């Protein structure tokens, strides 16, 4: 089972933001931690403020913090708007 991802944003200047998000993967029957997921990315907001695109990488770490898998991540243009806006 995956938990929601939590993290931080940092303004890098202009329309770019650095993002780091963490999530946990655990056995829903025992509660035992299976792995962590760490996603790092640089995202760019377009000139209208309505779309976000970017790239980064995801790492899967074992419970001791050792990286067991790394994969590139690409964010195609996505709407930055929300229903609460």
Image (cartoon, rainbow, N blue to C red):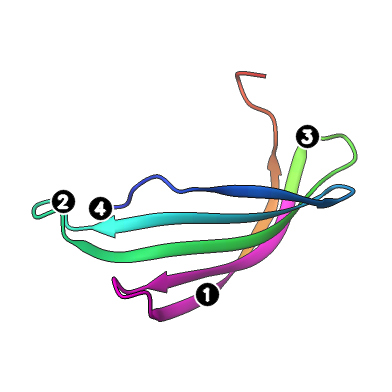
Residue 80 coordinates in the image, percent (x, y): 70, 36
25 vs 49: above or below: below
Q: Is residue 33 above or below residue 6?
A: below
Of pointers 2 and 1, the one earlier in the residue sequence: 2
Question: Going 82% across and 35% down the picture, which residue do you hit?
Answer: 49
- Does the segment drawn in magenta span residue 68? yes
Do the CB atoms of the residues marked 2 and 1 lie less than 8 Å apart? no
Residue at x-position 58% and y-position 69%: 57
Give the mark nearer the N terminus: 4 vs 2.
Answer: 4
Q: Secondary structure at mark 4?
A: loop
Look at the numbered discs 3 and 1 and tell me whether their residues touch, using CB distance below 8 Å: no
- Nearest to the observer: residue 35 or residue 74: 35
The circle on residue 28 is: 2
Query: Which residue is under mark 3?
Result: 50
> Could you say whether the residue bearing mark 1 is in a helix, strand or loop?
strand
Horizontal arrangement in the rendering, residue 33 relative to residue 38 (left or right): left
Q: Say if mark 1 contacts mark 4, CB within 8 Å.
A: no
Which residue lies under the disc numbered 1? 71
Residue at mark 2 to residue at mark 1: CA–CA distance:
25 Å
CA separation in Å, label 3 and label 1: 27 Å
Q: Is residue 66 left or right of residue 77?
A: left
In the shown orientation, is residue 82 left or right of residue 32? right
Please say whether residue 40 is one of the residues in the magenta stretch.
Answer: no
Span colored in magenta: 53-72
Label 4 belongs to which residue?
1
Q: CA distance from mark 4 to mark 2?
A: 6 Å
């Amino acid at each position: 089972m995956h938990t929601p991802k939590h993290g931080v944003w940092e303004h890098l200047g202009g329309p770019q933001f650095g993002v780091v998000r963490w999530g946990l993967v655990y056995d829903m029957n025992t509660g035992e931690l299976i792995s962590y997921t760490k996603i790092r990315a640089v995202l760019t907001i377009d000139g209208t403020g309505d779309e976000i695109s970017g790239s980064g990488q995801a790492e899967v770490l074992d419970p001791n913090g050792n990286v067991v898998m790394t994969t590139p991540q690409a964010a195609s243009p996505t709407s930055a708007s929300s229903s609460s806006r």
